[in-house]
Image (tube, coloured by chain):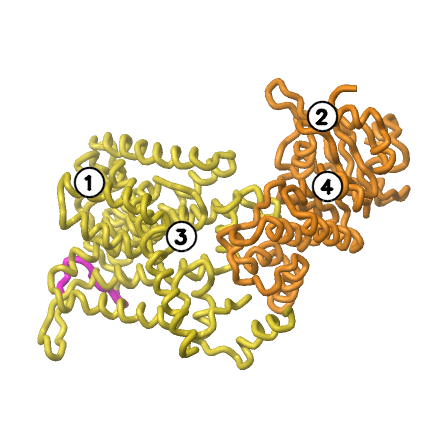
Chain colours: A yellow, B orange
Amino acid sequence: MAAESSASSSSSSPAAPSALGRLRNRLEGPNTIGNSRRFWVGFAVVLLGLVAFPLLGGGTGNQFSLFLVLGLLGLSLSLVWGYSGILSFGQTVFFGVGAYTFGVVSINFPTPGGITGAVVAGTLGGAVVAALLGYFMFYGGVRDVYVTIITLVSTLVMLTFMAQTAGSEWTIGEAPLGGFNGMPGMPLLTLGVEGIFTFQFVFNELELFVPVLGTVTFDPFYYLALALLLAGYLGLRVVVNMDFGRVLVAVREDEDRTQMFGYNVKRAKLIAFTLGGGFAGLAGVLYAARNVYIDPSVFELYFATLPVVWVSVGGRKSLLGAVVATIAVEYLRLNIGGELALVAVGALLLLSILVLPGGIVPWIDEKLTNSNLDVSEIDGTEPSTEVSES
Amino acid sequence: MSDSADRQSLGPNVRQTAAERATGDRTDTLLQTDDLVKTFGGFTATDSVDFSVDEGELRCLIGPNGAGKSTLLKLITGTLAPTDGSVYYNGHDITDLEPNERVDRGISMKFQVPSVYGDLTVRENARLPIQQFADGAERRQRVREAIEAAGLTGYEEVDASTLSHGQQQQLEISMAASLEPDLLLLDEPVAGLSLEERGEIADLVQELNDDGITFVIIEHDIDFVERIADAVTVLHQGAVFREGSIEDIRADDEVRRIYLGGE
């Protein structure tokens, strides 16, 4: 039996694996759903659809880019809560810090190089604030529900603080924080370095000639958001399927046990929380850049609960679930609008907890995987699901 | 340090400092607790416990419920911090070390409740401790061995939550052992297991002990204890009550009295 399994696990790489095979090895593992060729084909089709969407649908692409940006925020909570077991209501804190940092830096340095730097600064800002908060929580021995409470309170502290920054004394360089009125006057998102290459991403309508359709206009920001969301999703897939990802899942399952296997659990949680803060910070940067404006409403309780809803509905232990549910819930919320949207989102959360506590996407995956198994039993074409042990 | 060791005159096998260990007078005490006290509010869980284990020994720890057995184990692993007293391991004071730092020094533990990771497959479970120090082919080899030791070959891709209670116990012991500890602490490894499964655990423990791992095992099942133990320590009301061979302990009327209650 042992000899058999050794043979099969080593036979998966008799010849040197192709570059694509190595990439798949990194992207796939038991910690993510979608480890089959079939999944990647479907993934490519959906991706192509998203690429073509603004070209076909015209103006709606503009609104859709907001959902893609929020998808990054959903991803950050999936990593922190779904994989590491830290239920955080504070992802919007890092989101807001990223947004405000981007605003302050870009207003003070409104050149393409400066704005590019502001994107980096905002992302790092989210990560640094998460690292500070995380350090004091995790190394201070705060655990479980108390972490949740502290992150929730952090949001309210930020809301109260930013709301009282209306006075002119709250000006950083050229950038007034603006209290409840928010921070206007950000330069348009233009990335690159002066004199070499620069490109303006917002309020920039590009025209493209497409056969059959003729000339179409589209919003380049949409593609920036899509590319970053894609990179973020694939990047996190690599992370959660690494050795470190296995440690995070172990921490989520049983902290004490994992420590008794020799792992520095506090450090592992801090790294995950910081990485999550960076993702939330980047989402905040894109949010502020897209609106050319930011105000303290991003620290409100309602907004803080939204990522938890997205990730719960989609399936918190699934990165794909977080992205899909973020886009779907936000689409729904925007189209319902007003007070009714609140009710709908609440009902959706209740429904998913009661009926599908694991989330919708893992449930669908399970259904599909089971039907796939039936097929492979018949024709035997399904690629081996044996997981590499690299 | 050496003064206090002399003063206590616990014989040649008392704890040593690193210097003592390096400079000679070698003894084989692996673990020593010194006046270990742990109180929870007004309740004293362990009361000045002096407990020592030699290298290669298989020691069983018995005692009535609430005697402080699990607390003592958690003080040794660092899961709990003592109110007073010290823990020495391999001649070093490890009282202030974090649990994972103690693991690095060679202490490993299986908890009372089987706590394999239900969401991970058997292979992923087995891989978790091993991935810290082995890569590539060596890792694959060790993971395979750990799964084999747990008797779970063929179950590699099964979620650990679907294993039986006994299989989970074996998997967890195997995972703890795969860290190649010098000292392995087991908290009730056969509780809730069938007679057959108890035999399998006993075999596994004895095999690992033969490989040189020192054991401290909390167990209520006296037949199991009799089968594997070199020596037995009886804890009662947070203190060491008796220590000796299983025959001596069985014959001891006082021990029988505290277990059964009454004269």
**How far apart are labels 2 and 3 at the CA level?**
43 Å
Q: Which residue is mark 1?
A: A342
Q: Which residue is mark 4?
A: B217
Residue shown at the point (23%, 59%) measured from the top left = A190
On the same chain, marks 2 and 3? The answer is no
Q: Quadrant of residue A36?
A: bottom left
Q: Quadrant of residue A100?
A: top left
Q: Label 2 marks which chain's residue? A: B
Residue type at tag 2: Gly
Could you say where residue A76 lies in the image, as x and y percent from the top left? 36, 50
**How far apart are labels 4 and 3 at the CA level?**
36 Å
Q: Is residue A252 left or right of residue B167?
A: left
**Residue A298 drawn above or below residue B201:** above
**How far apart are labels 1 and 3 at the CA level?**
25 Å
On the same chain, marks 1 and 4? The answer is no
Q: Residue furthest left?
A: A214
In depth, the one of A245 and B222 nearer the eye is B222
**The C terminus of chain A lies in quadrant:** bottom right
Q: Which residue is mark 2?
A: B238
**Residue A311 colored magenta?**
no
Q: Label 4 marks which chain's residue? A: B
Q: Is residue A173 left or right of residue B140?
A: left
Pointer 4 local density, CA inside 10 Å: few below 14, some 14–19, many at least 20: many
**Residue B113 drawn above or below residue A169:** below
On the same chain, marks 2 and 1? The answer is no
Dot label at residue A317: 3
Where are the magenta residues, as a range? Answer: A195-205
**How far apart are labels 2 and 1 at the CA level?**
56 Å
**Secondary structure category for the residue under label 4:** strand
